[in-house]
Image (cartoon, grey):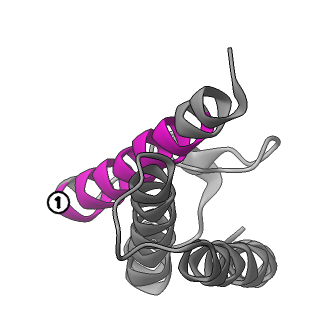
């Protein structure tokens, strides 16, 4: 397995994770319910949420953006891996940096939201 194959595999996983996060967000928004597997940290019981509707309103857009950032980052990585002309290394690095910055911000924001609703 060469390096490009490994990078492509990782980029496919990132795309799949982005799609999954978007799916979870849409499901949460449409059903109005929380499920234990919906990006909830370990140790938080969804049945003990003080205000489920408020939590969903607070976190839905941010969670959707997390999925979009992951999807775009993985897709740009795949385009670079397969040599699409307009995607150069700096473009990929910028999308990767944006994704990492947003993921760190989302994690810190999620901690605040969890303190508020649990």
Q: Is residue 34 visible?
A: no
Can you identify the residue that label 1 sits on? Answer: 30
- Image position, residue 89 (x, y; %): 62, 72
- Residue positioned most to the left: 30
Q: Is residue 13 visible?
A: yes
The vertical placement of 32 against 43, above or below, is below
Task: Tell me which residue sits at (59%, 61%) in the image.
Answer: 49
Q: Quadrant of residue 71?
A: bottom left
- Image position, residue 65 (x, y; %): 43, 77
The vertical placement of 34 against 106, above or below, is above
Task: Tell me which residue sits at (51%, 65%) in the image.
Answer: 73
The vertical placement of 86 against 25, above or below, is below
Q: Which residues are magenta?
A: 10-30
* Depth order, front residue of 103/33: 103
* Depth order, front residue of 1/48: 1
Q: Quadrant of the C terminus?
A: bottom right
Dot 1: few (<14), some (14–19), or many (≥20) neighbours within 10 Å?
A: few
The vertical placement of 109 against 39, above or below, is below
Q: Secondary structure at mark 1?
A: helix
* Depth order, front residue of 35/77: 77
- Image position, residue 38 (x, y; %): 50, 46
């Amino acid at each position: 397995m060469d390096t490009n194959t490994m990078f492509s595999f990782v980029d496919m996983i990132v795309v799949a994770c982005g799609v999954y996060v978007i799916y979870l967000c849409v499901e949460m928004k449409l059903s109005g319910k929380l499920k234990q597997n919906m990006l909830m940290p370990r140790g938080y019981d969804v049945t003990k949420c003080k205000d489920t509707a408020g939590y969903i309103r607070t976190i839905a857009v941010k969670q959707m953006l997390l999925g979009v950032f992951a999807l775009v980052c993985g897709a740009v990585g795949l385009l670079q891996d397969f040599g699409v002309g307009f995607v150069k290394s700096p473009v990929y690095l910028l999308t990767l940096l944006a994704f990492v910055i947003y993921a760190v911000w989302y994690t810190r924001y999620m901690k605040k939201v969890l303190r508020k609703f649990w």
